[in-house]
Image (tube, rainbow, N blue to C red):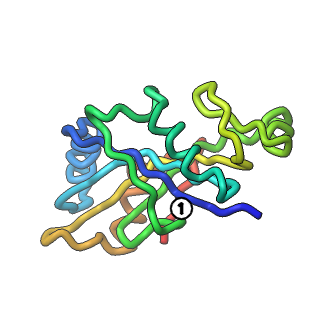
Amino acid sequence: MTVTRCVEVALTIPDNEAETALATLRRLGVELAQLRRADLYRVELNPAQEDAVIATLRDLETIYNPNKHSLRVRADRKPQAGELWVEELHGESRSSAAAARAGQVRIAGRLLPGVTRIERFTAWRMLENGGEAAGPEVVARAAQTLLCNPAFQKATVR
């Protein structure tokens, strides 16, 4: 039996990419007060190895640097209100599918024991004035105008 966990890695320092995207969205007529970005990993794993997997992610310098990132396990497994998850459409290779079936899932070259699947998303959180989550129309417009290129990305909303 496996469980699914979502691990969010977000910058604790100013995020120039999110600030640039926010300025561009405003120029395109999408009104937002704030735009936040995080890397999100949706992991299917053996519950007995959850702590070890989280520790491995914390040890991977290409994913998490404690000097500039926060890492948390989210309770939700799907986008929340005002949130858009974007994933690359690159298709799973036969070798990576076979490796997953054999329990050989790797990230950044490191083996993740007990993991049967891992997916990476860019999570965009959109906030309106007052800190409320942006409405579904605003999220859809932001995705269509800038945050997701349907030629090679897929957007998931609430």
Assign a secondary structure to mark 1: strand
- Say which of 77 and 136 sits in front: 77
- Say which of 144 and 90 sits in front: 90
Image coordinates of residue 133 in percent, x first then y, are 28, 71
Residue 104 lies left or right of residue 69; in this view the side is right
Residue 102 found in image quarter: top right
Whether residue 107 is visible to the viewer of this picture, yes or no, is yes
Give me the residue at 35% from left, 31% from top.
65
- Which residue in the structure is indicated by mark 1? 156
- Say which of 13 and 58 sits in front: 58
In the picture, the quarter occupied by the N terminus is bottom right
Instruction: Classify 132 as above or below 28.
Output: below
Image coordinates of residue 110 in percent, x first then y, are 62, 28
Residue 80 found in image quarter: bottom left
Q: Residue furthest left?
A: 130
Give me the residue at 70% from left, 55% from top.
46
Instruction: Classify 44 as above or below 136.
Output: above
Give me the residue at 66% from left, 56% from top.
48
Residue 88 lies left or right of residue 12; in this view the side is right
Give me the residue at 38% from left, 54% from top.
124
Crowdedness near tag 1: few (<14), some (14–19) or many (≥20) residues, C-alpha within 10 Å = some
Residue 24 found in image quarter: top left
Whether residue 144 is visible to the viewer of this picture, yes or no, is no
Instruction: Classify 34 as above or below 62.
Output: below
